[in-house]
Amino acid sequence: MLVQQQRVQFSAYSDLYNLIIPKENILRKINEVIDFSFIYDELLNKYCLNNGRNAESPIRMFKYLLLKSIYTLSDVDVVERSRFDMSFKYFLEMAPEEDVINPSSLTKFRKLRLKDTDLLNLLIGKTVAIAIDKGIIKSKSIIVDATHTLSRSNPFSALEVLRERSKLLRKTVYQFDEEFKSKMPSKNVENDLNKELAYCKELEKSIENEPSLSSIPAVKEKLNLLKETANDTGEQLVFSKDTDAKTGHKSADSPFFGYKTHLAMSEERIITAAVVTSGEKGDGPELPKLLKISQENGMDVEAIIGDAAYSGKENLKIARDQSIKIVAKLNPSITQRFRKDQDRFDYNKDADRFVCPAGHLATRKARQNKKNVGKNQVDVYYFDIEKCRLCPMREGCYKDGAKSKTYSVSIKSELHQDQMDFQESDYYREKSKQRYKIEAKNSELKNAHGYGKATSYGLENMQMQGAMAIFAVNLKRILKLI
């Protein structure tokens, strides 16, 4: 049962806070600047109002999570510190002598109370509203960029997983019939996925042909696991406990496994919007969402500042329709042919390559018609044919039996003449100087708030981690500017 909590419980020791907690303490300032009752209102429908024992205050539970983000603490450590740190007790609106919660309550709060809550947009919207109300945000520009977060789990290639599954199957078989080794097919020793799949099929067949073995529950279990993995290999080339994480690229030679957080920020360094995606997603396609969320949060946007990934013609058109300037260097490689959304090839500006709809990065690119100045030049991007052959999205993209898979982009600078002219203006040069600010904000999120690595598995948990980290950095920035 949820009961509206008092701000601070009556206690003979409450005056200690005025003696111990200085006025410049960040937690005291946060309590003074923001009314956290919006958390109570948002989560009201997640609690029973008239049955059961009293629940922990959702505001206090939320503040625990905020402390975790501000100080990069575990559940156990943040609760333990709230036992003796008076600034924590004051922030949590506890009486000085009051006992702390069980750390497991935080896990339940995240899973039961915050699930299906759009915490990311809620918290960003709240801090932007405060910044606008206090006159902190005066600019009419947003700076956009994406930062990557590594998954908590290490990825394994399909080849590695198949070998591990077949090893487990062989080991189990030998427990019941060690002489069966002579009947086993020869193991694949090459790093070739197709050959490994062929070996697994042979292994399955040899065991299935021996009913006395394949009917044993332990053997049957490992055999079915290998079959399932072999079948799934056509749908995914990387396996991990973190099923939502994907492989992205910081450069052509620097892959990472995890997530991307696409950010929009005012020139005053207040984050105005965020979209969390898996790691392989391109930056440019997320711009319309960042713009819309920023506007819904109260931003009046006249300019968007970013890098070359955001100057695609779709983004230029959206900006032109709203009389918004895009302060981003034009890169001819990001022009797109007309394709359905699900068939889009996204440009990865860090790697200077296109990424196919399945998330695979082109292995190289080449330019045709270099010498023919009067003719249209074309950039041709080449993809790994071995991945294309197994890709579940190959229909309509890869023709069976083809020896190569390419994606070609015509470079037609006349389509972007207005943007090219704009790049020569003084306004463009002055505004582009602001872009460094979001690089510093990305660094702050990672170094000061642990955003370099995911703390849990799954996209939903990554969004929650992003919500708390961004809420913390926005609050700190607001306090600094007041």
Image (tube, rainbow, N blue to C red):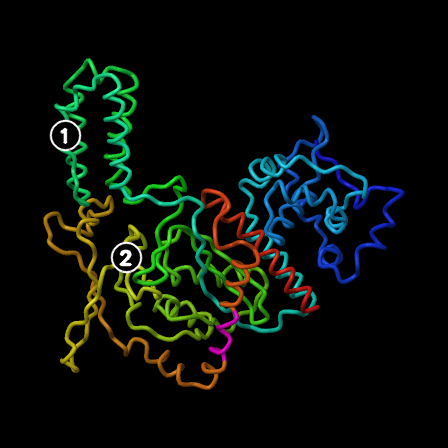
Residue 432 among those drawn in magenta: yes
Q: Residue furthest toward the right? A: 12
What amino acid does circle 1 point to?
Answer: Glu
Could you tell me which residue is drawn at 53 percent across and 52 percent down? 466
- 398 sits left or right of 473 in the view: left
- 31 sits left or right of 77 in the view: right
Q: Position of residue 76 (x, y in %)?
A: 62, 40
Q: Is residue 429 above or below residue 400?
A: below
Quarter holding the C terminus? bottom right
- Which residue bears the numbered disc 1? 202
- 348 sits left or right of 392 in the view: right
What amino acid does circle 2 point to?
Answer: Leu
Quarter holding the N terminus? top right
Could you tell me which residue is drawn at 13 percent across and 24 percent down? 182
User: Which structural element holds mark 1?
Assistant: helix
Give the mark, 2 or 1, whose residue is nearer the N terminus.
1
Give the extent of the magenta segment: 431-437
Asked if labels 1 and 2 touch by Cβ distance under 8 angstroms, the answer is no
Could you tell me which residue is drawn at 71 percent across and 44 percent down? 82
Per the rendering, the mark at residue 306 is none
Q: Residue furthest toward the top? A: 212
Residue 222 among those drawn in magenta: no
Question: What is the CA distance from the residue labelled 2 to the residue labelled 1?
Answer: 32 Å
- Please tell me whether mark 2 or mark 1 is closer to you in this view: 1
Could you tell me which residue is drawn at 89 percent across and 43 percent down? 12
Q: Position of residue 406 (x, y in %)?
A: 18, 60
Q: Position of residue 126 (x, y in %)?
A: 63, 56
Q: Position of residue 412 (x, y in %)?
A: 25, 75
- Which residue bears the numbered disc 2? 361
